[in-house]
């Protein structure tokens, strides 16, 4: 995932928490904040130390980033997203993470309608 698609600064992440809307399923919480005049979307990730050691947390983050990369064609642009992994995410494989993320993004209504043929 390209650097400009990431939210790194704590202030920006806090902004999404404060002003964004949250959507959740059992594995993830996604905060969505609309940004005027932004032609891409940006992603911030939060994986708590409660989920496991650094190896586990980094693996979860890699899975989330890869899922977002695969779904990027159908994710609405112009938004900032902060994705928080919950406990069950620690034991999930790549495909489960993608499926779960896709579900929570559908709930958030940020997937573009035309998603034919994106399942790889």
Image (tube, rainbow, N blue to C red):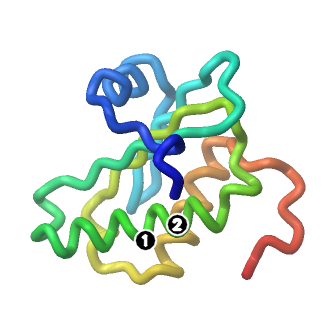
- Would residue 8 be found to the left or right of residue 71 on screen? left
Q: Quadrant of residue 44?
A: top left
Quadrant where the C terminus sits is: bottom right
Q: Secondary structure at mark 2?
A: helix
- Would residue 25 be found to the left or right of residue 88 on screen? right
- Would residue 30 be found to the left or right of residue 98 on screen? left
Q: Secondary structure at mark 1?
A: helix
Residue 73 got which mark? none
What residue is drawn where x is 88% and y is 68%? 116
What residue is drawn where x is 69% and y is 42%? 109
What residue is drawn where x is 46% and y is 36%? 31
Per the image, the residue denoted by label 1 is 63
Earlier-in-chain disc, 2 versus 1: 1
Callout 2: 10 Å neighbours few (<14), some, many (20+)? Answer: many
- Place of residue 80 in the rendered image (x, y in percent of width and height, measured from the top left): 53, 33
- Place of residue 25 in the rendered image (x, y in percent of width and height, measured from the top left): 46, 55
What residue is drawn where x is 45% and y is 63%? 64
Mark 2 → mark 1, Cα distance in angstroms: 11 Å
| Closer mark to the observer between disc 2 and disc 1 | 1
- Place of residue 85 in the rendered image (x, y in percent of width and height, measured from the top left): 33, 56
- Would residue 31 be found to the left or right of residue 109 on screen? left
Q: Given contact means CB atoms under 8 Å apart, are the residues at marks 2 and 1 in contact?
A: no
- Place of residue 15 in the rendered image (x, y in percent of width and height, measured from the top left): 38, 20
Residue closer to the observer: 40 or 96? 40
Callout 1: 10 Å neighbours few (<14), some, many (20+)? Answer: many
Per the image, the residue denoted by label 2 is 100
């Amino acid at each position: 995932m390209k650097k400009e698609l990431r939210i790194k600064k704590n202030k920006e992440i806090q902004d999404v928490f404060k002003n964004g809307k949250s959507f959740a399923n059992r594995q993830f919480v996604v905060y969505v904040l609309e940004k005027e005049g932004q032609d891409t979307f940006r992603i911030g990730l939060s994986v708590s130390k409660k989920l496991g050691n650094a190896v586990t947390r980094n693996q979860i983050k890699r899975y989330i980033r890869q899922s977002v990369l695969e779904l990027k064609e159908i994710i609405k642009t112009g938004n900032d997203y902060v994705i928080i992994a919950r406990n069950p995410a620690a034991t999930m494989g790549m495909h489960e993470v993608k499926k779960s993320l896709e579900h929570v993004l559908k709930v958030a209504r940020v997937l573009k309608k035309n998603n034919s043929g994106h399942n790889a």
